[in-house]
Image (cartoon, rainbow, N blue to C red):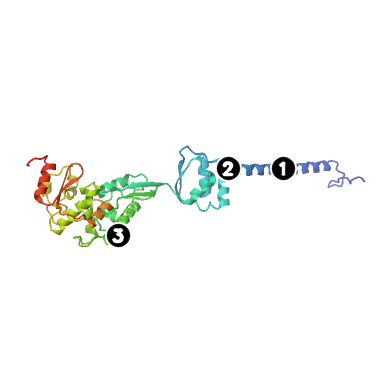
Amino acid sequence: MKPEPEIDKNGVECKSCAGLKRTLIALMVMIILITGFAGTWIVLKYQEFLVQPLVLPGNGMDYAIPAGTSLRGVAGDLHRLGVTQHPHFLIWLGRRTKLDSRLQAGEYRIAFGTTPPQLLEQFASGIVVQYSQTIVEGWNFREMLRYVQDNPALTGTLEGIEAAEIMERLGYPGIHPEGRFFPDTYHFPKGTTDIEFLQRAYRTMERHLEEEWQNREEGLPLKNAEEALILASIVEKETGVADERGQIAGVFIRRLNRKMRLQTDPTVIYGMGENFDGNIRRKDLRTDTPYNTYTRDGLPPTPIAMPGLDAIRAVLHPKEGKALYFVAKGDGSHQFSATLKEHNRAVRKYQLGGKGN
C-alpha cells in the first residue's frame, strides 16, 4: 500500500515536502548532538577549572577585596589580572558552594598553587594578611608616635595633632600619654587606623597594670597603680640588663621609704626635653624642672617612658637588699652600694677612671 502523498497548503501534491521534513529532522538531530557535545565540553572544562591552580607568580600575590564587592566583581578583577581565564566558572562555583555570599573584605595573600575552590574558601575565611608594629620598651611617646605614623600599613589620622588632642580622640581626655602604651609587637590588617592601634596598646597597658597592681607586695611606698607606672618607667630607662631591674627597683623603693630623693638621671633628661644634646652636666642636675629628681622629692609627675611588663613587676616585687646607690660600670651593668662612702668609691672607679683613690 503506497503512503499518501504530501499535500501543500493549496491542496496540491508536494513532492519536496518529504525531503524538507527529512532535512528538518536531520538539523534537529545535529543541534541536539552539538548541544550535547558543547555541554560535555563545558562540564569537562569546569572540572578541569576546579583542579587547575590559578595563574600566580612563584611567590604568590596579595589581593585586596574592598568592602561591598560582589563575587562577580572579584571574578572580573581576577580575570583582568590574568589570575583566571574563566571568571564565569568562578561565579558558578561560588553560587554552587554558597560561598558567594560569604566573601569578607580585606587583603589576602594567595599562595602559588591555589585552586579556585581553595581561593573562595580563603576569601570566605576572613583570614587576612597581618602587618605588625612593635612598641619598644623605653620609648617615649614622641618616639612611639613617630614609628606608628611611619608604618605604611596603618591609616594615619593623627599627623600634626598635639598629644593632648590625641588622647582626647583616643577617648582618654586629660590623661598624659607618657607610659600609657604597652610595649609589645601588635599584628593588624592593612587599613587599621593609628587611633585603633593606639587604643589597643593603651587598653593592653591598662589590663597588665591593673593585674600586676592587684598582685603587688604589701608595704610598698606607692599610693596607686599610677605611681607604680611612673617608677616602672624610671627603672626601664635606668637599665637594659634584665637581672638588674629588681635591684634597681629595690634601691628606689628603699630611698622612697627613707624620704631620700631618687636622684636618677633619666628623669632629668626627660625634663630637659629637646634641650638634651646627649650629655648631662652638673648644671643640668641643678636646674629645676618638674622631672628633676635631684631637686625635687618623690616621684616625677608622669612616667618618662613606656615600661615593659618586667619593669612593672620589678617595681611591685623589688629585690630585697641594703643598696641605696648604684653607678653605671660602662658595660651596661651597675655597681650597687649600701653607703655613700662605698658609692663614691664606685663612682671614682667606674666614672672617673680611678681618680681620687
Residue sitting nearer the eye, 120 or 251: 251
Residue 97 numbered mark, or none: none
Query: On the image, numbered disc 1 is attached to which residue?
Result: 33
Q: Quadrant of the C terminus?
A: top left
| Label 2 secondary element | helix
Residue sitting nearer the eye, 239 or 33: 239
Disc 1 crowd rating (10 Å Cα; few below 14, some 14-19, many 20+) is: few
Residue drawn at x 28%, y 55% as measured from the top left: 167
Q: CA distance from mark 1 to mark 3?
A: 76 Å
Residue drawn at x 27%, y 61% as measured from the top left: 215
Kind of residue sitting beneath label 3: Glu
Quarter location, residue 279:
top left
Disc 2 crowd rating (10 Å Cα; few below 14, some 14-19, many 20+) is: many
Q: Mark 3 or 2, which is nearer the eye?
A: 3
Q: Earlier in the sequence, mark 3 or mark 2?
A: 2
Q: Position of residue 328 (x, y in %)?
A: 17, 45
324 sits to left or right of 52: left
Q: Mark 1 or 3, which is nearer the eye?
A: 3
Q: Are marks 1 and 3 in contact (CB under 8 Å)?
A: no
Q: Position of residue 356 (x, y in %)?
A: 6, 42
Query: On the image, numbered disc 3 is attached to which residue?
Result: 211
Q: Tell me, yes or no, if residue 87 can be seen here.
A: yes
Kind of residue sitting beneath label 1: Leu
21 sits to left or right of 309: right
Q: CA distance from mark 2 to mark 1?
A: 24 Å
Residue 311 against residue 47 in the figure, above or below: below
